[in-house]
């Protein structure tokens, strides 16, 4: 079906809303045509992934929009930038790149985006209502928004996200359409030990397995009723969206569109794959890229640590001094909460470097030693080798802390056998 | 010899060596925006350079910043000569659309299922209508 625009959308396309608005409508209408959408849908909010510097092109585009008078028309949060403007963690970008990254961040702020600078906007107060249409970028945020909040968004690529924020419109296709949100396969975890299912370290691994199986399909995970927390769902979605093109997942009995199997499948029979210990161990082994047991640095916080996770880190360190560099990536919202709790100083004195507004895998913060990085994040494990040159060891947050205290890999295998 | 025509998504002509990716790739975290080299260590074609190729993607995965990486490759003149996608991927095509808005020459994009991709010659010329011929 060809794309039909409303009278107002046609006028915006013709330039009645200014040149910036016309540009945004052109990009949205062309995307709608390419993806086979027959109309646009009003969106209530946006989350912008496009303000991270990958080269001068993104900065030039953002400043082009500002020159054309672009302003966002709906509440809009910002994903990470390439610089830490809140905690001052040092980014080792050369001067030109540093300047362009800074200009890019300021350009998006100038368009009216809220300077949240976090990949976990849903933990910084941006929580769209169940069933509402929104336009979000950043793969983990998209997965959380669709799956845990039950709002509806496609995986909006950089630049389309700001166009949606300016026009308050998005192409109506994909996950905006209720019928496209049903599960077509299931992963059944009911055969796994309850202790494993209730451990934080399990969730990025099952998320990775889910993403590998899903590709672009939508699935539901069975057997995890009563095991999820918000931070576990966050970790699952980030891992799944790194391993596959996962924009939406369902956890039976835990996520809002999966109260029961009939609802989440639309009443159809779907294949259910039993998850075995060997499948899980293969996915877990794939998150590490080395057998090396000397640990050179630790990074957590992809997605950004919540205030609860930072306090958990503080409890696990228990007043000890970390031998290895330890980076905790987080948002300024969580740093503010940490300060309120009075624990920021203790954490930093133990040797934790707080990195806000950005993270160690999207911008060069890690020392250039190219050694072994340990992480509890399925997403860091996936992207760190390519982006930082470090090899990766995956483990629980507690294991990351013990490894940072001793400088050697400390990992508990019993849970997985 | 006639070959199945590609379906033009963003029409245009292209020619070059055909690089078939044997696994899905996220451009962000998977391709170095400064060189066009595949840097995802778990990817079978890690180390290959995508610039100037007719790049066949069975599927794209991962980051929504892949459009930004493609835009940077386009600005630097080291983008693929054409994108051939198993299923139309909005994220990559946005990179092309924004490049056009900026006045930078963007590669054309075509749809062709993975079986059709496997049947492409090692070097090819694609006409604007999607007809493909081997490049000798």
Image (tube, coloured by chain):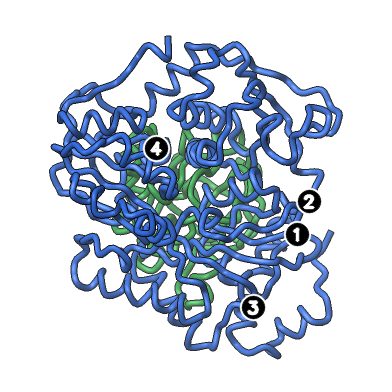
Disc 1 designates what residue?
A172
Depth check: A308 or A86 in front? A308
Q: Is residue A91 above or below residue B47?
A: below
Residue identifier under label 3:
A73
Q: Closest to the observer: A250 or B134?
A: A250
Mark 4 vs 2, N-terminal side? 2
Chain seen in blue:
A
Mark 3, other Cα within 10 Å: few <14 / some 14–19 / many ≥20: some
Q: Measure the C-alpha gap from mark 2 to mark 3.
A: 23 Å
* For discs 2 and 3, the disc positioned in front in the rendered view: 3
From the image, tell me which residue sits under label 4: A377
Give the mark, 1 or 3, whose residue is nearer the N terminus.
Answer: 3
Q: Position of residue B64 (x, y in %)?
A: 51, 54
For the point 39% across and 72% down, the residue is: A105
Chain designation of label 1: A
- Please, which chain is the residue tagged with disc 4 on? A
Q: Quadrant of the N terminus of chain B?
A: top right
Report the side of A311 relative to B129 (left or right): left
Left or right: where B110 falls relative to B77: right
What label sits on residue A177 in the rendered view? 2
């Amino acid at each position: 079906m060809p794309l039909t625009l409303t009278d107002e959308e046609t006028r915006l396309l013709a330039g009645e809303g200014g040149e910036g608005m016309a540009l945004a409508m052109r990009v949205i209408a062309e995307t709608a045509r390419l993806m086979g959408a027959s109309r646009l849908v009003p969106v209530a909010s946006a989350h912008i992934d496009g303000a991270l510097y990958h080269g001068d092109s993104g900065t030039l585009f953002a400043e082009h929009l500002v020159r054309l008078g672009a302003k966002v028309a709906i509440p809009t949060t910002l994903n990470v930038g390439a610089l830490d403007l809140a905690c001052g963690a040092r980014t080792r970008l050369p001067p030109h790149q540093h300047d362009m990254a800074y200009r890019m961040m300021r350009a998006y702020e100038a368009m009216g985006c809220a300077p949240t600078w976090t990949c976990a906007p849903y933990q910084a107060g941006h929580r769209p209502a169940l069933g509402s249409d929104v336009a979000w970028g950043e793969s983990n945020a998209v997965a959380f928004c669709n799956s845990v909040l039950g709002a509806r968004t496609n995986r909006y690529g950089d630049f389309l996200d700001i166009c949606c924020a300016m026009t308050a419109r998005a192409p109506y296709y994909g996950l905006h359409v209720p019928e496209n949100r049903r599960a077509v396969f299931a992963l059944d975890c009911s055969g796994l030990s309850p202790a494993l299912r209730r451990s934080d370290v399990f969730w990025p691994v099952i998320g990775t397995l889910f993403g590998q199986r899903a590709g672009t399909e939508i699935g539901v995970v069975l057997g995890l009723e009563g095991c999820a927390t918000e931070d576990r769902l966050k970790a699952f979605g980030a891992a799944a969206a790194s391993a596959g093109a996962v924009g939406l997942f369902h956890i039976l009995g835990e996520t809002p569109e999966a109260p029961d199997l009939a609802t989440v499948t639309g009443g159809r029979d779907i294949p259910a794959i039993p998850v075995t210990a060997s499948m899980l161990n293969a996915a877990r082994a794939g998150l590490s890229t080395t057998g090396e047991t000397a640990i050179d640095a630790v990074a957590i916080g992809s997605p950004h640590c919540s205030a609860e996770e930072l306090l958990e880190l503080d409890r696990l360190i228990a007043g000890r001094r970390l031998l290895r560099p330890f980076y905790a990536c987080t948002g300024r919202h969580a740093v503010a909460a940490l300060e309120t709790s009075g624990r920021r100083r203790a954490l930093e004195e133990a040797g934790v470097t707080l990195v806000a507004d950005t993270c160690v895998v999207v911008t060069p913060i890690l020392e250039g030693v190219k050694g072994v990085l340990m992480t509890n994040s399925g997403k860091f494990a996936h992207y760190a080798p390519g982006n930082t040159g470090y090899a990766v060891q995956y483990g629980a947050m507690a294991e990351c802390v013990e490894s940072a205290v001793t400088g050697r890999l400390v990992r508990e295998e019993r849970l997985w056998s | 010899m006639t070959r199945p025509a590609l379906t033009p998504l963003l029409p245009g002509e292209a020619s070059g060596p055909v690089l078939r990716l044997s696994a899905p790739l996220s451009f962000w975290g998977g391709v170095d925006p400064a060189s066009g080299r595949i840097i995802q260590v778990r990817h079978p074609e890690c180390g290959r350079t995508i610039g100037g190729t007719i790049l066949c993607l069975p599927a794209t995965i991962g980051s929504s910043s892949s459009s930004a990486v493609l835009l940077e490759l386009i600005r630097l003149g080291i983008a693929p000569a054409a994108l051939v996608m198993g299923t139309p991927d909005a994220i990559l095509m946005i990179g092309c659309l924004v490049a056009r808005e900026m006045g930078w020459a963007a590669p054309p994009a075509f749809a062709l299922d993975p079986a059709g991709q496997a049947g492409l010659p090692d070097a090819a010329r694609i006409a604007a209508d999607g007809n493909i011929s081997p490049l000798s």
